[in-house]
Amino acid sequence: MKQTCHVCMHHCSLAPGQTGICLARKNVGGKIVCGNYGMITSLALDPIEKKPLKLFYPGSRILSVGSFGCNLKCPFCQNHEISMADEKTAEAVTGLAELSPEELARKASEYRKAGNIGVAFTYNEPLIGWEYVKDTARLVKAAGMKAVLVTNGSASMEVLEEILPYTDAMNIDLKGFCEAYYRKLGGDLETVKTFIRRAVKDCHVELTTLIVPGENDGIEEMEEEAGWIASLGKEIPLHISRFFPQYRMTDRRATDVGQIYRLTETAGKYLEHVFAGNCMQ
């Protein structure tokens, strides 16, 4: 019997044994389950600034964890080896380690002496496996540490409400401010705007926009984006990041540094904290 997954805007209708667009959620015995629960492809102790989070415990480090799969199909994804992979492919490319929520929370505590403040769910899209995020974050917070989410924001309000009580900070990718561009990436702008609008009410939120030449690099679009963010709070940080050719966009040039700074200046007319990213490479 088919079942509908309600985690994101795709609402995949899945027959028994079938996996959704995200490559992680699947129909098992007539129930939609998290197929990547506790399956880890990446684990690293990162500077908090790499998430990027500039105004949340700056100078600290955070244990960063990722699995496989994503509900968007961005052709510029820097982690495509895992985000565009199903379980079998991820196992072949990176190997999979199984870590229960208890084991990951315990590992995070062990790294406190190295400056660790908690756990960041990142690298692939963590909310396609929101159950693992929630179960782990609850333990991390109970241990007096912080839970951080790096997400594309393409999740339902039901999922967001489940994880918000256990989340201290998020960096949310706002890919651009044009619905047509979001459709090209397999997403929906209004879903992300709704997600951001709710998230900023209950946790620290910073936003990131990767500027891809010829796609979302216009001054007018940034005016509209920054104005909308300011309507939620002028203090919300925005990272405007430089694109480099990779994955399926190796034929594109890197974003002009001058354009990044022009867009940063534009956003700065509306927002108190605007950061240019990747401009030193």
Image (spheres, helix red, strand yellow):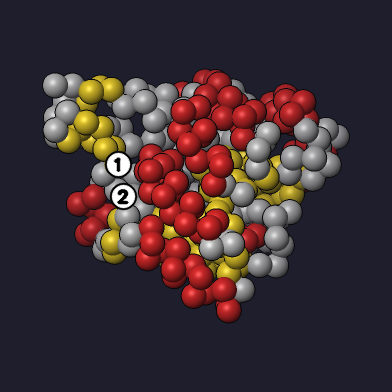
Which secondary structure, mark 2? loop
**Residue at image coords 68%, 45%:** 204
Give the vertical position of 203 relative to 55 (above or below): above
In the rendered image, which quarter is residue 99 located in?
A: bottom left
Is there any visible trace of residue 280 in the rendered image?
yes
Closer to us: 93 or 57 = 57
Q: Tell me the residue at 44%/59% (across/down).
A: 65
Picture disc at residue 190: none
Return the residue nearer the eye: 149 or 75.
149
Residue 28, image quadrant: top left
Q: Residue furthest bottom?
A: 113
Spot occupied by residue 209 in the image (x, y as percentages of width and height): 62, 40
Q: Disc 2 marks which residue? A: 37
- Dot 1, crowdedness within 10 Å: few (<14), some or many (≥20)? some
Q: Is residue 41 visible?
A: no
Look at 56% across and 52% down and name the residue there. 148
Q: Are marks 2 and 1 in contact (CB under 8 Å)?
A: yes
Please, what is the three-letter code of the amino acid marked with disc 1? Answer: Cys
Q: Position of residue 266 (x, y in %)?
A: 80, 35
Q: In the rendered image, which residue does mark 1 sit on?
A: 34
